Amino acid sequence: MALYLALGLTYSLTTPLFEAPDEVEHFEYVRALAHTGAFPDLRAADRPWRQEGAQPPLAYLSAAAALRLVDPHLPVDEIALNPHARIGLPNAEANKNRVVPPAPDSRLARSVRLVRLVSLGWATLGVVGAYVLARLIFDVPVRGDLALFYAVSLAFILANLGLGLLISTVATNQRQAMMIGYFFILPNILLSGFMFPREAMPDPARWLGLLFPLTYFLDVLRGIILRGVGLDALWRQTLILTAFATLLLTVSVARFRKKLD
C-alpha cells in the first residue's frame, strides 16, 4: 500500500498540470459542481466538461466538497488552451502541451493538485476495500508470502506499463491508441484464464494465451494466495514476467527515444 501511494503521489506531483488524460474536462466539471452545487447540464455541447458526466458521481462530489472546504471562494482563473499545440501529431514540430501551464503557486494550480489527491484517495480506498472484502466477506485466505506477491506484481505492472508505452509510440492519436489497446485487452481477459479455465480451451487458444503477461500473473496469484507455494514452484512464471517487463520496456524506451530524435 505504501508503494502504491508513493507511485500515485509521484505521478500526481510530477505530471504537468492539465496534461493527464481528460484532466481539463474533469476539473471543469468539478469546478462547476462546486460553484453551483448541482451537476452540470451535459446537454450544453459548448461547455468544457462535455462527456465527463459518465464518471462516478461520488468522486466528483467529494472533489467539489474538498474544493469548497479548502478554498470557499474557488479559483475563477480561466484555463488557457495552447494555440500552438499539435495534439495527436507526434512528429509535428510544435509544442505538445495542450494547456498553457498556470503558475505553480496560483490558486488554480493548488486546486488541480487537490482534485488529484482526492482521486488518489478514492483509488487507495478501492484497493483497501477489495482486500477487506476478500478477507472478511468472501473469506479468501492468504496462505503465501505477500512480499513475494508484491515483487511479482511489480514485474507484472512494469510489463503492462511497457506495453502501454509501446502502444503510445506506435499510435499517432488517442483514439488510435485506444483501439490498439482493445486489441490486446480482450484476448488478455478471454485467453489468460481470468474468465474461463485454460484447460477447457482448444490448443490454439491456449498457445495464444501464452503471449500475455496476465496468464502467468494469474498462476502466481492463485499459487501464492490460495495454495501458499513459494518461488520454488513459481520461478518459471516469475522469470517469464520479468522477461516480459525487460523486453517491453527496452523496446518502448528505444522507440520513444527514436521519436524524440
Image: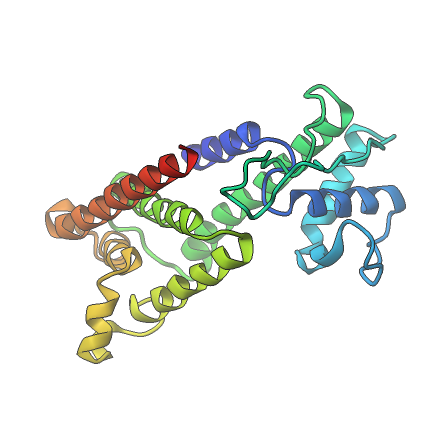
In the rendered view, would you say 220 is above or below 204?
above
* Residue 150 visible in the displayed image: no
For residue 246, which quarter of the picture?
top left
Farthest top residue?
105
Q: Can you give x and y, in whole percent of width and height, for residue 60 in the image?
A: 72, 48
* Colouring method of the image: rainbow
Q: Pick the residue in front: 34 or 252.
A: 252
In the rendered view, would you say 78 is above or below 224?
above
Q: Is residue 85 left or right of residue 229?
A: right
User: What's the residue at 52%, 31% (across, down)?
Assistant: 9
Q: In this view, does 213 lie to the left or right of 166?
A: left
User: What's the residue at 75%, 29% (across, down)?
Assistant: 108
Q: Can you give x and y, in whole percent of width and height, for residue 134 in the image?
A: 42, 56
**Number of callouts in the render?**
0
Q: Can you give x and y, in whole percent of width and height, for residue 217 in the image?
A: 27, 54
Quarter holding the N terminus is: top left
Quarter holding the C terminus is: top left
Q: Pick the residue in front: 33 or 28.
A: 28
For residue 28, which quarter of the picture?
top right
* Residue 76 visible in the displayed image: yes
For residue 249, which quarter of the picture?
top left
Farthest front residue?
93
Q: Pick the residue in front: 168 or 126.
A: 168
